[in-house]
């Protein structure tokens, strides 16, 4: 991506899948153009904090250790809790007054759901103004373990989301036979896109009939700029969580996690696998465009384009305008 001038938006963003962080594990992390330490305390809570120790600046993730609910610095063993408060200095009689007034390091609000650890980012450290929701299939034992894919892309995340409403590109980039029909509904931080495409007919036994077509439905739900679910609904149903995290303003991490019903009859299981492979393959098509395009702030749009302007207005609410907004009270 060339000449990007879009800032990093605020919102909930993926940090890691829950299973990637075991109790007592400490990992370096870099998102939002900031260095972080990610760790899981002995009671099982995931924490994400600024990386550099308030004492002499060691990176807490390079040699730091979990001690109960705290992290001990690898340099002089100061212990900080998950809120970034200095709790213990093994060789000092007292905690210095400067460290007694509260947090010495920013601790990002964290939540775990849909088998993933999410952190809230705001450039002015403002508390969460909206929440995420459960994707029911992601905690349902009838649904399979997640099949995951990830990419790093030189693009701001606003551009990724625009792909879903850019209906013309499905024909010219992804070789769809017809322009899909997309309806976009906006409710505050939520965005729901319903897309109907024409696809090859599949009957109730899983037989494919290439001479006929049928409607194929895709419902995408977005919660803020970083988290979405996609439900592919046909004779078989596949659910995907798509997440996007800004590494910097101009580089992002894209993750897809798919689940399907366990014990699907073989034609449907094969069709589901085919659908997953196709969705993943299509990212490759987009990648060439994303990595080389520029961002046009005032594009010339035509009547056949999808609801691109509407999408951009919705997305712009996640760029900090410097005003105070009412923070959300999250259940603890
Ligand atoms: S730098 Fe962390 S304890 Fe000294
Ligand atoms: Fe695309």
Image: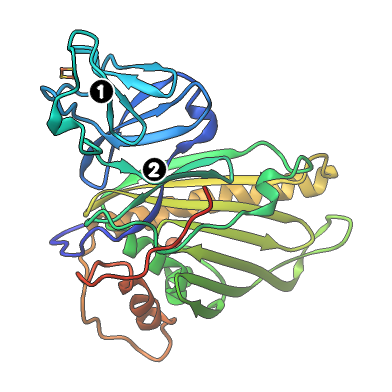
Query: Residue 158, how many percent across, how many down?
Result: 33, 64
Q: Is residue 273 visible?
A: no
Query: Residue 55, how many percent across, how many down?
Result: 13, 23
Report crowding for label 1: few under 14, some 14 to 19, many 20 or more residues within 10 A (C-alpha).
many
Question: Dot 2 lies on which element?
Answer: strand
158 sits to left or right of 184: left
Question: Dot 1 lies on which element?
Answer: loop
Please say if the residues under marks 1 and 2 sit with CB atoms less than 8 Å apart: no
Residues under labels 1 and 2: Cα distance? 26 Å
Ligand 1 neighbours mark 1 (CB distance < 8 Å)? yes
96 sits to left or right of 103: left
Q: Residue at x 64, y 60 (%)?
A: 231
User: Which residue position holds label 1?
Assistant: 60
Q: Is residue 70 visible?
A: yes
Query: Residue 33, how many percent across, how many down?
Result: 21, 45
Question: Residue 151 shows which numbered tag?
Answer: 2
Q: Residue at x 31, y 59 (%)?
A: 10
The image quarter in which residue 6 lies: bottom left
């Amino acid at each position: 991506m060339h000449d990007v001038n879009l800032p990093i938006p605020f919102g909930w963003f993926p940090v890691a899948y829950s299973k990637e962080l075991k109790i007592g594990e400490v990992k370096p992390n870099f998102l939002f153009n900031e260095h972080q330490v990610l760790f899981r305390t002995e009671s099982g809570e995931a924490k994400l904090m600024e990386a550099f120790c308030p004492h002499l600046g060691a990176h807490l993730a390079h040699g730091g250790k979990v001690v109960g609910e705290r992290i001990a610095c690898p340099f002089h063993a100061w212990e900080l809790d998950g809120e970034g408060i200095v709790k213990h200095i093994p060789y000092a009689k007292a905690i210095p007054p400067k460290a007694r007034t509260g947090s010495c390091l920013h601790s990002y609000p964290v939540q775990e759901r849909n088998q993933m650890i999410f952190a809230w980012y705001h450039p002015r450290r403002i508390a969460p103004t909206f929440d995420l929701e459960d994707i029911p299939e992601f905690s349902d034992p009838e649904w399979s373990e997640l099949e995951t894919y990830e990419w790093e892309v030189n693009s701001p995340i606003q551009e990724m989301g625009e792909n879903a409403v850019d209906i013309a590109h499905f024909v010219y980039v992804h070789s769809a036979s017809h322009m899909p029909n997309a309806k976009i509904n906006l409710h505050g931080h939520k965005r729901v896109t319903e897309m109907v495409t024409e696809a090859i007919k599949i009957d109730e036994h899983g037989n494919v009939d290439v001479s006929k077509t049928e409607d194929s439905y895709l419902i995408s739900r977005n919660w803020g700029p970083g988290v979405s679910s996609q439900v592919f609904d046909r004779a078989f149903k596949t659910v995907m969580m798509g997440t996007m995290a800004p590494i910097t303003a101009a580089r992002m991490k894209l993750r897809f996690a798919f689940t399907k019903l366990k014990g699907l009859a073989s034609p449907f299981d094969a069709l589901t696998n085919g659908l997953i492979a196709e969705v993943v393959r299509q990212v490759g098509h987009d990648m060439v465009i994303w990595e080389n395009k520029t961002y046009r702030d005032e594009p010339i749009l035509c009547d056949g384009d999808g609801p691109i302007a509407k999408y951009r207005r919705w997305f712009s609410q996640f760029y900090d305008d410097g005003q105070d907004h009412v923070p959300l009270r999250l259940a603890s």
